[in-house]
Each structure stands twice: as C-alpha cells, then as structure tokens.
Image (tube, helix red, strand yellow):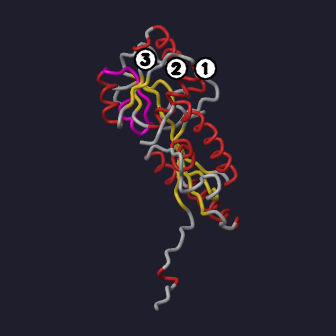
Amino acid sequence: MSTATSASIPARPLAEAANIGTQAASVGLYPKLQYDPRKDFEPIILIGSFPMVIAANPSFPGNSVADVIATAKSTPKSADIAMPSTTARIVFELLKAQSQAPLFGIPYKGSATAISETMGGQVPLIVDTVTAVRPHVAAGKLKAIAVTSLKSTELLPGVKPVAEQGLPGFQVIAWNALYAPKGTPKETIQILNAEINKILAQPESRQKLKDLGYDVGGGTPEQLAEFGRSERRKWGPLIAAAGIKAE
C-alpha cells in the first residue's frame, strides 16, 4: 500500500482573485453555492474597479441623465436601453427604480451586437463597460451620458456620474480584488496588503491598470470587507426584485 507524500497534495493558493460576480452578485444569482463569500475568505485588497457607462447614439436628443428620464416619460420608446450583461441589467434596474421613469431594457448576449445596434440607431441608449464604450465615444460614434461610479473617472474625463446628475448615491461598478482562504493568519494578510499597495502605487502599475480600463484600487483589508458587504446589500435586493437568474 502506497503512502501519499506532501508533494502529491496540491497546496492551497495564498491569495485568490475574486470579483463582483463571485463575491456579491453570485449570492443573488444562484440559489445554491458551493462556497459562502461572507464566511470562506479573508479580504486582502481591492485591485481595481471600473464604472459602467450610460451612452447614446449621437442623434439622441439629450446629453444628461435628466434628459434620459424626461425622454422616457414623454416618449418611452425613444429611451430604450440596450443591456449586454448582467451588470448592465443591474444598472438599468437601479436607474429605473431611483428615477421612477418608464424605462425599457433590451437584453443582448454581448457587447458587439448591442454597441453596433446603438451606433446604428436601432436602439437609442446602451449601458456597457467603460472599456467597451470608450473607443466609440472617442470616435464620435457614441456619446457618453454618465458613468456609474460615485465620482468622475480618469477613464472618461469630463463625464459626470449618475450620482451627480440628480440621483444621489447611485453606484454600480465592476471590480476585482484579492482574498485569502479563511483562517489565513492576520499577519500574512497585512504583509500581502502592504506589498500590493506598494505595487499599486507605482506609476507603471497605475498606467497598466488604466490602459486595461481600471481605476486603481488599494486600501486596507477592513475597507475591502466593508465594501464587499455593501455590494451584497445592494445587489441582492436588486437581483431579486428584477427576477434575474444566472444563465
């Protein structure tokens, strides 16, 4: 009878990448998970985040969230919104709930078709990632109405957040972070946090993340823990109210 050696047993990773899906949205999207994002991980650090963007065909008769709401109330079909992802659907649902406007969302299976049809005028508005929308805004094929972060972003300079356009507190962002397995010593967490904060402070690291479409993260494990809790409090009720299910 052979005996297993320590070399044959895969070691658990010291840190694991996680995101808005695994740490927040999954709780509402899946009736049963094989893990508990609230109990099975130790937060280390937020790596980066990026806002979604509400954008429009250049012919859309408005340039602000107030214009979108007014158009929806006066001519509803003129403010239909393309939704190429679950995150876009969440932005739409939150916008609809907070504005009380009769908005109508059109689901798409991906950004390519949704953006193409928005630029082509088949649908007047779209919610998508800043990475997907930014080049078309720069080319003048779409115009950015608002970003969904609480504050303006360097990724789309000059574009105001929804939260500064009449809907205070509005925020839906996608994000990536590092977590450790539950039970990882606090000292290890602190060392990892300090070292990654140093990396994120380097100009080349910040530029690389910006090139990838991210606002740079950072901060403490405690801040990431609270952020994760706030994201679950936000996403759970929205997903339930909208009846969104994992595809």
Question: Could you tell which of marks 1 and 2 lies nearer the N-terminus?
Answer: 2
Residue most extreme to the top = 74
Density class for disc 3 (Cα within 10 Å; few <14, some 14-19, many ≥20) is many
Question: Could you tell which of marks 3 and 2 lies nearer the N-terminus?
Answer: 2
Above or below, comparing residue 234 to residue 42 in the picture: above
Question: Could you tell which of marks 1 and 3 lies nearer the N-terminus?
Answer: 3
Q: Position of residue 214 (x, y in %)?
A: 49, 44
Q: Which residues are magenta?
A: 121-137
Q: Position of residue 242 (x, y in %)?
A: 52, 30
Left or right of 43? Residue 118 is left
Label 3–label 2 contact, CB within 8 A: no
Residue 227 position by quadrant: top right
Tag 1: amino acid: Gly
Numbered label attached to residue 65: 2
Label 3 and label 2: CA atoms lie apart by: 11 Å
Q: Position of residue 149 (x, y in %)?
A: 56, 34
Residue 42 position by quadrant: bottom right
Left or right of 14? Residue 134 is left
Label 1, on which residue?
166
Element under disc 3: helix
Label 1–label 2 contact, CB within 8 A: yes
Element under disc 2: helix
Tag 2: amino acid: Val
Tag 3: amino acid: Ala
Taking depth in this image into account, of 57 and 109 the one nearest to the observer is: 109
